[in-house]
Image (cartoon, coloured by chain):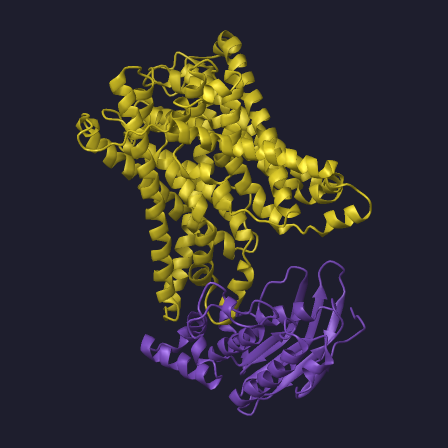
Chain colours: A purple, B yellow
Amino acid sequence: MSSESPEICFREQLLHWQESGTTLALPDIILAKGQSAGVMGPSGCGKSSWLRCLLGEAVGHVKLTGEFYVRDREISKLAIEDRNIGILLQDNPLFPHYSVRKNLAFALQKKNVSRAEQNQMIASQLALLGMADFIDRLPGQLSGGQRARIGLLRTVLAEPALVLLDEPFNALDSQRRQQVRDWTFAFLKQRGISSIIVSHQADDLTYVDQHVSWPEGVSE
Amino acid sequence: MIRQAMWVLGLVLTGGALLAPWWFAGQGLPMALPLTGTGFWDYPGIATVVGKTLLVGLLSSLLALACASLIMARDAVALNPARNDVGITFAAPHLAFAIAFLWLFTPYGWFDRLLPFSLPWFEQQSLVTLITILVIKETPFLVVMGRQQLGQLPYRQWLLQGQALGTAPDRSWWLVVFPAWLRAMRLILFAVAIYSVAVVDLAQVAGPLNPPLLAPLIVSWQLQFDAVSQSLAAQGTWLLIAFGVVMVVAFYLLERSLTKLIGWRIGSRVKPAVTRIAAAATHWFSFTARGIFVVVSCMALVALVALSLGRGWFYPQVLPQVWNFEHWLERSGDALTLATTTLGLALATATLATLMIVWLREWQRYRSYELADAWLLLALFVPQLSLVVAWLASDWSTFMSSTYISVLVAHVWFSFAYGYLVYAPAERAVTQIHLSVGRSLGYRYWHSWWWFKRPLLHSALAHCFMVTFLVSVAQYVPTLLLSAGRLPTLTTELVAVSSGGEWQLPALYATLLWLIAFSALMLTQITRKKRVLR
């Protein structure tokens, strides 16, 4: 692939259900740095399974085949930790028994920096979010919106090329949902991180650059 | 009105059965503290007794925790974790296993005859032998309980998140899941550590002599009726309680230190090669440990059967001169009586304990009030011997109408805590909505429980029944001391006949004991499988 190649390139994707033997042909997803794609579809159509396959998780009942390039690297055979893909799940995004500081430090291990530098980095990032005072709190002491923001910050601090968001705003009430959604897309765009979001709510996909329709028909 | 009365009646019966033993313990606990000047510390070899007892308690529990953690580490990251790998070792009664272990591995034992060299590690009665047997027996218990506790944590999600942040799954286990798992295992670890420091039957059979460990020493003092021995037993009881406290403090500090240490490692970079080597080492250890447990347990069972059937099996012969059932036929009368008593007690214990546990869980749900587990498991946090010695000095025997009832109550009381450990987490994970829907359809509370909630708890109920059954089968101290030897079971008789040089009779009793325990395990598995197939 050339130097101008896209950041993310998923092509000829086939999602195969092992038990029923059915196969779904999914549209190509090609994203430049910082671009986002939104996928909407009814519950139970396989969106979350597809995301987990992209992440590299072995999902028992489905199999995903195709070409999967992240920053020009074919990722199909790589382990989850080597794919350069982050994920934000809908609930419990943080490790509940570790403080905000430790949760964020978890994402910094690849950087090979001293503990003092790590602490400085964490403090400055939290200050940018206006959450500097929350550094030693446990996730259980944060509101749903605060947890969602720390969860995304942790994902982003690991510097992935792509972030997968699986119904990330479901646990929030409608007012908080809108705030966190606006902030999430702005945050990812500002950091130049591509993203794919799946949701069953059209509002969640307002800011995405590409809308991907989940196919209704089933092919062989 | 009648329904309310039923709840009150259940509360009185269950509450009474759980609280009365504490009242008797408080009444009978001898106020004879082992202070300086009381003569307790002048007992010959007491310093060695103290040192060895603490060493056995700490070392065996620590090693069992280390083994169980490594097995759990592999389990957690495996896609299809093993489930029944340690079942045979878990179900093996401690004492039966110990008898077989001694016959296989000690000098003049089977391996000593088979191999051209001697196995230098295991003496017939030594610290190393006792610690090894305790580790082999306690690790499967921790693994079985650990799997249940792990099932309550969203550990797969945590591992996935760890991986998505660039951490290999094996490292994610140690950094994220292990501290939470260790915290969830706290009460179970306390129970194991206290059991190890206060173990009587295994220590009598495989532990050191001259001087022995503290718990068997207290039993020997208790069984002598002179005033000096009784005073020593009373003071020893307090020392054993203090050792229990030492174990709790030690394991609490260990948990805190490990958690702190692991917390410090978060954010540190580790070379991928190191992670890979560590993962491979964990995998190798887990595989080997499981293999050792299964192989040693199978060998132990075969050895027991062979010992009970072989005649003229003199050193250094690898095989006996004759195989026959003569010994079984000669001893069938005694053995059958002992087996019947053991089985009867275990069935009655398991039934009563399971009913009490189910009732207590439902009462908490009904009242929307959750009792702290620590209160209900308190029986596991005090050395069993100290409690039984206290009961002997109280009105316990006056209150109980017969020896059988006295022993049965003690069995139910000690089994309750283990059963609760098994049943409560599973029950908590089941939604109450089905029961409520049943009631909305016009079913009464327990009718609805039976038809709508019980099927969801079938596996947990079977498991609870099996565990309480196994605990009863293994009871030695309460059976021996509360019945004053008038209600012999396979376990009490096995200890009694193991002190001699003869192997055949202990092997016969141990085989029977194992068969009873193994039948319970098999029945539980079959019942669970049938349920799944329906």
* Residue B62 left/right relative to B488: left
Instruction: Name the residue rendered at 33%, 20% in the picture.
Output: B222
Provide residue B238's location: percent of width, then percent of height.
Answer: 31, 33
Vertical position of residue B342 compared to residue A103: above or below: above
Instruction: Name the residue rendered at 50%, 16% in the picture.
Output: B403
* Residue B283 left/right relative to B204: right
Res A171 → quadrant: bottom right
Provide residue A168's location: percent of width, then percent of height.
Answer: 62, 74
The C terminus of chain B sits in image quarter? top right
Instruction: Name the residue rendered at 73%, 42% in the picture.
Output: B445
Count of numbered marks = 0
* Residue A211 left/right relative to B389: right
Vertical position of residue B290 compared to residue B469: above or below: below
Provide residue B326's location: percent of width, then percent of height.
Answer: 49, 9
Identity of the residue furthest to the bottom in this view: A4
Task: Report the front residue among B313 and B28.
Answer: B28
Provide residue B421's location: percent of width, then percent of height.
Answer: 52, 42
Task: Report the front residue among B105 and A137.
Answer: A137
Residue B213 shows in the view: no
Residue B534 shows in the view: yes
Task: Report the front residue among A151 and A25.
Answer: A151
* Residue B124 left/right relative to B323: left
Identity of the residue furthest to the front in this view: B1
The N terminus of chain B sits in image quarter? top right
Res B314 → quadrant: top left
Instruction: Name the residue rendered at 27%, 20% in the picture.
Output: B229
